[in-house]
Image (cartoon, grey):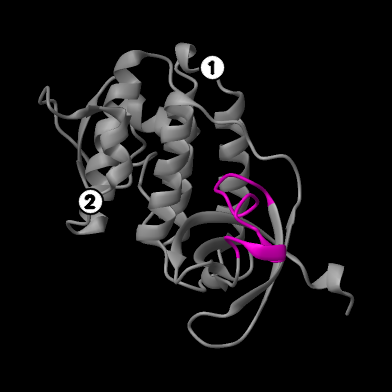
Amino acid sequence: MSEAASLKPAYVLHHRRYQESSLIVELFTPNQGRIGVLAKGALGGKTNRSGSLQPFTPLLVDWRGRGQLPTLTHCDVASTAHSLKGKALFCAMYLNELILKMTEPQDAHERLFASYTSSIEALAKADPSNDALEPVLRRFECLLLDELGLGLSLTHDQDGKPLQSDLRYQYDIELGPRLDQAQSAVMGSTLLALDEGCFDSLEQRREARALMRRVIDWHLQGAELKSRELFR
C-alpha cells in the first residue's frame, strides 16, 4: 500500500504540550474514532507541525504503534482551515468538547465524523445575526446521541401516539415525551422541529436548547463543559 493510500482524514480535537518540543494530540477520525497520538518534535526543528496541528483544519494523517499513545508519522493539511470567529468559534469548540467527553477512544463513528465535518463547514459560513448557528448545534447533538445509542424520541409519545404540534409534553430522558399541559413542558412543535433540525421561532430554539442541555448534562453525569462558559 502506498503512503498516500494509508493516510486517514482527521481533525484535531485538542492538544497539549509534552516535554520540551512534542505534543499529545487528540484526533477525531472516521474509522478509528477518537485517538490520542504523540507528535514528536511538533514544536520545533525540521518537523515543526504546530501550525498544522490546530483544531478545525482538515488533515490527512498516519501513525505507528499499537499502545495507548502511538506516534504520529505523517500529517498533511488536506484543505484550508475553516475560518471561525466569535460565536461560531465557541460553537465549534463546544462540538469538540462533546466528542471528547461523550465518545469512547477508538470507537468508530463514520456518520458522526461526516456530521462534524459538515457542521464545522456550516458554522464557518453561518451568519450569527440570523440565528443560523443553533440549528447546526442541535442537529449535531441529536446525531451524536443517536450514534451512542441514546437517541431521543421526537415524533411519538410514551404510548406510541404521534406528537401533536399544538400540545405540550413533559420529556422524560429515559422514557420520552408524555402529554402534560403545564407551562414548563415543551411544545410538541419544538420536539418535531428538533427532529427536523430547523426551527420556526425564537421560542422553539429556546425550548430545544434547554431540552438538549438537560439531556446532555444527564448523560455527562456531572462532567462540566468548559466551552459553555465562553457564551457568557
Location of mark 1 (residue): 127
The picture places residue 139, in percent across and down from the top left corner, at 48, 38
Q: Label 2 crowding class (10 Å Cα cut-off): few <14, some 14-19, many 20+?
A: few
> Could you tell me which residue is drawn at 41 percent across and 59 percent down?
100
Mark closest to the chain's N terminus, 1 or 2: 1
Under mark 2, the amino acid is: Glu
Pick out the residue farthest to the right.
Answer: 2
Q: CA distance from mark 1 to mark 2?
A: 28 Å
The picture places residue 224, in percent across and down from the top left corner, at 23, 51
- Predominant secondary structure in magenta? loop
> Between residues 51 and 226, which one lies in front from this camera angle?
51
The reply to whether the magenta stretch includes residue 56 is yes
Q: Label 1 crowding class (10 Å Cα cut-off): few <14, some 14-19, many 20+?
A: few
User: Residues in magenta?
Assistant: 42-58
The picture places residue 230, in percent across and down from the top left corner, at 31, 33
At numbered mark 1, what does the secondary structure look like: helix, strand or loop? loop
Q: Which mark is residue 50?
A: none
Q: Which mark is residue 224?
A: 2
> Could you tell me which residue is drawn at 26 percent across and 57 percent down?
219
The quarter in which the N terminus is drawn is bottom right
Q: Is residue 128 above or below residue 48?
A: above
At numbered mark 2, what does the secondary structure look like: helix, strand or loop? loop
Pick out the residue farthest to the bottom.
Answer: 66
The quarter in which the C terminus is drawn is top left
